[in-house]
């Protein structure tokens, strides 16, 4: 049978992910910090996008929805489901339902006019508005405060400054600079002394001598090649490195296992002296370089606030401070479009208008979707908000997705990198989703997080003479109608970084004697 080529026409349906839909999916899973960065880039790229804020000394009015909802009164009635954002998944029907294809004026509903208030300067500071917003003498350019802030001092710079004072010889300085270049952020030397000596063409003894000089620098313990040497340097600085302490530092593996009986024999000390030595070691810094050039800690800003209502319900609202407020400059578009311009310019401005309209609608739908998911979470976890983590209920993404009429992958993206501020503290939305653990005598299942909390409470309350084994914890949990296996208790205990019963017994006995 001969093979032939033929031209055939087939008709079918397929799901096409347009750039706009991909952008909407991306927006849904971004954190508020990542979203702010993305919006800033779009503001610079698109001339039709403007921030909804005051201009020229007057207030600009921007339409702003009321991002609040009573958890006890049902989910918010958002816009048409045609704008529900969904990621690409195997379930094409669910994806098409959540993404939709219509681009009508569904977002024009339920809008309320809100005025962006002009920020007032703090009272009692004795500073004029000019001092806060501009340069002296009425200069219109805003002062760059960052230019006057000192940059963070890195560990390498700190060590290099000490090297220039401590060493006069040019060769020793070259060796010292090479050693400093191989010290990591934690303060440890990552290269072998022999390798450095071969590369520089000097004797290993010369490199060792310079390394001793570097190890005398601040912070104490820097330049060590391993943890034991780091601790030894710090103990020598405190004049506490005696033979007993040397034996303890030489057997850190036994200290990690809390094998205090073996340590007592090796160090030749009694229980009281060993307890003092262990406390001394724990006060040392295992990573002396972390204090220099560390990345600034970015505070977590909540996306949702949950407050108790007057009728024992929970009031859920979005944090308006992290919601970007954007406007589409229609007047500028109209002014440009009537002018006789090249086809490329008209195409560019039309694309900018389409992108701006889609972005503003996507941002609004993102906010509404987050609010719907958060409201449903609060509805399920009202006992946790009222009584604490012991009353956290089992919850899955599918449960929330079915309740609000979305696909569970949409809920998964909404709960990523989003935080909720509650009377119980600040929690990531994913914290409220836990697997269920069956009750031993029937009844409502228990949340894994609640069981983990009870295990921690039991261990915290145990006495040195009655240490609970994993089997004992299983029996105590079954007494309160929680059916759990011993291996699950061990897994939860290890996730809490709680040592075994043998190690806890050794540690508490030594601490009690000390």
Image: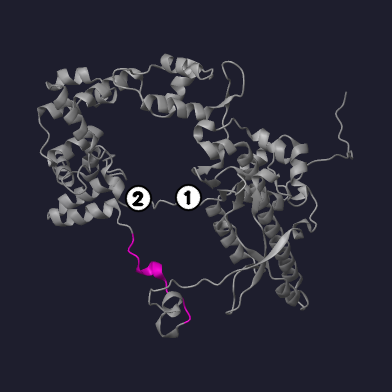
The answer, for residue 200, to whether it is visible in the render is yes
Q: Is residue 410 above or below residue 363?
A: above
Which element is circle 2 on?
loop
The residue at the point 29 percent across, 19 percent down is 505
Q: Is residue 144 magenta?
A: yes
Marks 2/1: CA–CA distance:
18 Å
The residue at the point 74 percent across, 35 percent down is 91
Tell me where residue 108 appears, x and y as whole percent.
76, 60
Q: Earlier in the sequence, mark 2 or mark 1?
A: 2
The answer to whether residue 324 is left or right of residue 79 is left
Q: Quadrant of residue 209?
A: top left
Q: Is residue 258 above or below residue 10?
A: above
Split into 4 quadrants, where in the image is the C terminus?
Answer: top left
Tell me the residue that label 2 is attached to.
294
Split into 4 quadrants, where in the image is the N terminus?
Answer: top right
Tell me the residue that label 1 is attached to.
300
The answer to whether residue 187 is left or right of residue 116 is left
- Could you say which is closer to the camera, residue 344 or residue 45? 45
Crowd around label 1: few <14 · some 14–19 · many ≥20 (10 Å): some
Tell me where residue 194 appears, x and y as whole percent.
22, 37
Which element is circle 1 on?
loop
Q: Is residue 52 magenta?
A: no
Tell me where residue 247 appears, x and y as whole percent.
15, 25
- Could you say which is closer to the camera, residue 57 or residue 35? 57
Q: Which residues are magenta?
A: 140-151
Q: Is residue 306 above or below residue 331?
A: above
């Amino acid at each position: 049978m001969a093979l032939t080529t033929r031209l055939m026409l087939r008709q079918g349906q397929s799901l096409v992910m347009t750039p706009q839909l991909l952008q909407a999916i991306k927006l849904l899973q971004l954190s508020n910090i990542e979203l702010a960065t993305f919006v800033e880039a779009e503001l610079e790229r698109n001339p039709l996008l403007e921030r909804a804020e005051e201009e020229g000394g007057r207030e600009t009015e921007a339409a702003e929805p009321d991002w609040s909802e009573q958890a006890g009164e049902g989910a918010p009635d958002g816009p048409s489901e045609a704008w529900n954002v969904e990621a690409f998944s195997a379930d094409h029907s669910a994806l098409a339902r959540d993404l939709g294809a219509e681009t009508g004026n569904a977002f024009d509903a339920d809008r309320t006019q809100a005025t962006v208030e002009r920020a007032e300067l703090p009272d009692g500071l004795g500073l004029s508005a000019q001092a806060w917003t501009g340069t002296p003498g009425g200069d219109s350019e805003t002062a760059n405060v960052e230019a006057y802030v000192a940059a963070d001092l890195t560990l390498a710079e700190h060590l290099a400054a000490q090297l220039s004072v401590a060493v006069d010889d040019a060769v020793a300085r070259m060796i010292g600079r090479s050693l400093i270049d191989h010290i990591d952020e934690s303060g440890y030397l990552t290269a072998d002394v022999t390798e450095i000596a071969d590369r520089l063409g000097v004797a290993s003894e010369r490199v060792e001598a310079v390394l001793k000089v570097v190890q005398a620098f601040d912070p104490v313990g820097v330049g060590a090649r391993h943890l034991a040497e780091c601790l030894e340097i710090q103990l020598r600085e405190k004049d506490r490195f005696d033979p007993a302490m040397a034996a303890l530092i030489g057997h850190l593996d036994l200290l990690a296992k809390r094998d205090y009986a073996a340590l007592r024999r090796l160090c030749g000390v009694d229980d009281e002296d060993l307890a003092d030595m262990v406390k001394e070691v724990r006060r040392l810094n295992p990573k002396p370089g972390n204090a220099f050039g560390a990345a600034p800690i970015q505070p977590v800003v909540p996306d949702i606030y949950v407050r108790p209502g007057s009728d024992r319900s929970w009031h859920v609202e979005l944090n308006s401070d992290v919601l970007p407020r954007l406007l589409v400059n229609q007047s500028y578009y109209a002014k440009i479009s009537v002018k006789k311009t090249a086809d490329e310019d008209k195409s560019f401005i039309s694309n900018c208008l389409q992108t701006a309209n889609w972005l503003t609608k996507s941002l609004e739908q993102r906010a509404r979707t987050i609010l719907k998911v958060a409201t449903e979470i609060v509805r399920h976890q009202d006992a946790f908000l009222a009584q604490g983590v012991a009353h956290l209920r089992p919850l899955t993404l599918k449960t929330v997705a079915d309740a609000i009429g979305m696909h569970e992958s949409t809920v998964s993206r909404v709960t990523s990198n989003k935080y909720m501020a509650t009377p119980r503290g600040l929690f990531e939305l994913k914290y409220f989703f836990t697997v269920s653990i069956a009750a031993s005598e029937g009844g409502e299942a228990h949340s894994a997080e609640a069981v983990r909390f009870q295990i921690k409470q039991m261990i915290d309350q145990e006495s040195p003479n009655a240490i609970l084994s994993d089997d004992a914890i299983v029996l105590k949990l079954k007494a309160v109608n929680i059916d759990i296996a011993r291996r699950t208790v061990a897994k939860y205990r290890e996730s809490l970084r709680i040592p075994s019963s043998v190690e806890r017994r050794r540690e508490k006995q030594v601490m009690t004697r000390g």
